[in-house]
Image (spheres, rainbow, N blue to C red):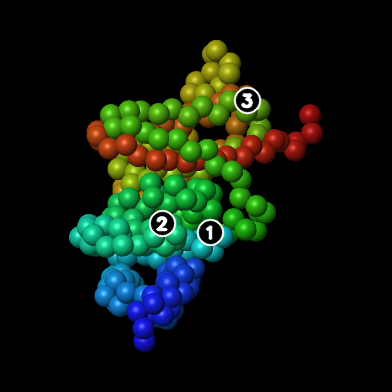
Amino acid sequence: MPKRELRVASNQILSLFQDNYPEMVATKVNLCYNESICLFLSIFVDILFSLKNVKFYSDKKKLLQIFINVPWYFSVIYSMFSPFLTHRTKSKFVISKEGNAAETLYKFIRPEDIPVQYGGLSRPTDSQNGPPKPASEFSIKGGEKVNIQIEGIEGGATISWDIVVGGWDLEYTAEFVPNAEEGYAIVVEKPRRMKASDEAVCNSFTTGEAGKLSISVDNSLSRKKKVAAYHYTVRKSTTAV
């Protein structure tokens, strides 16, 4: 085939490859404009799928393929060949290093849409209660303690909340503080050390009087900045006065 025709054909295949990659790689259909790069990509993805601890998350809304808990050496390898990929391809293919799942996913997906096993707030049973409640995101710097105050809770109301910190490894606690000056704070959840593998905390508390819920996450013993998210609902008492 003449060089000019070969170049045209290569460009056409390249365009098709960019439009469909990496979905095609996931189904083992490879269209190659550069055999060495394509072969390397295919082998790379196949190995990722075979690794025990690596998880594959697909966001169908954004056509985004995310590999979670990828060993550091695979991240290095990917960084070596990623310059050969166009921005369109790289925007569909995300590598998240070990212990960095939540921080990576939060850049692309809302926390309430991310499954709890990946550092989000979405549980299989949530769909039974309608659309997920939007979550509030925040970050915790190394050596920092964050207190979340949920105020305006009426007496007899039930407050339910979910909270998660990416890669926890910090202390978590919750208490209810009555509005009355003579009232005493009630420990809802005793201080406990959350492990890195722990999923989102889900809890509820029915108040006996008006007050506020105070949730604390203490990252004082770590130097690493962490992403976090929470949401809550307050259901007022239905008891007739």
Q: At 28% from the left edge and 29% from the top edge, which residue is drawn?
A: 143
Q: Nearer the viewer, mark 1 or mark 2?
A: 2
Spatial CA distance of label 2 from label 3 is 47 Å
Of marks 2 and 3, the one in the foreground? 2
Q: Is residue 233 left or right of residue 164?
A: right
For this orientation, the residue located farthest to the bottom is 1
Check residue 196 in the rendering and tell me which mark sits there, or answer none. none
Residue at the right extreme of this rendering: 240
The kind of secondary structure element at disc 1 is: loop
On the image, numbered disc 2 is attached to which residue?
Answer: 87
**Residue 204 drawn at (x, y percent):** 55, 41
Which percent across, then down, holds residue 136? 52, 38
Residues under labels 1 and 2: Cα distance? 15 Å
Q: Position of residue 78 (x, y in %)?
A: 27, 61
| Amino acid on which disc 2 is placed | His
N-term mark: 1 or 2: 1
The N terminus: image quadrant: bottom left
**Quadrant of the frame with the C terminus:** top right
* Residue for badge 1: 62
Which residue is more in the foreground, 56 or 183? 56
* Residue under label 3: 152
In the rendered structure, which amino acid carries the disc numbered 1? Lys
Q: Quick one: label 2 or label 3, which is nearer the N terminus?
A: 2
Between 63 and 116, the residue placed more toward the observer is 63
Q: Residue at x 42, y 62 (%)?
A: 89
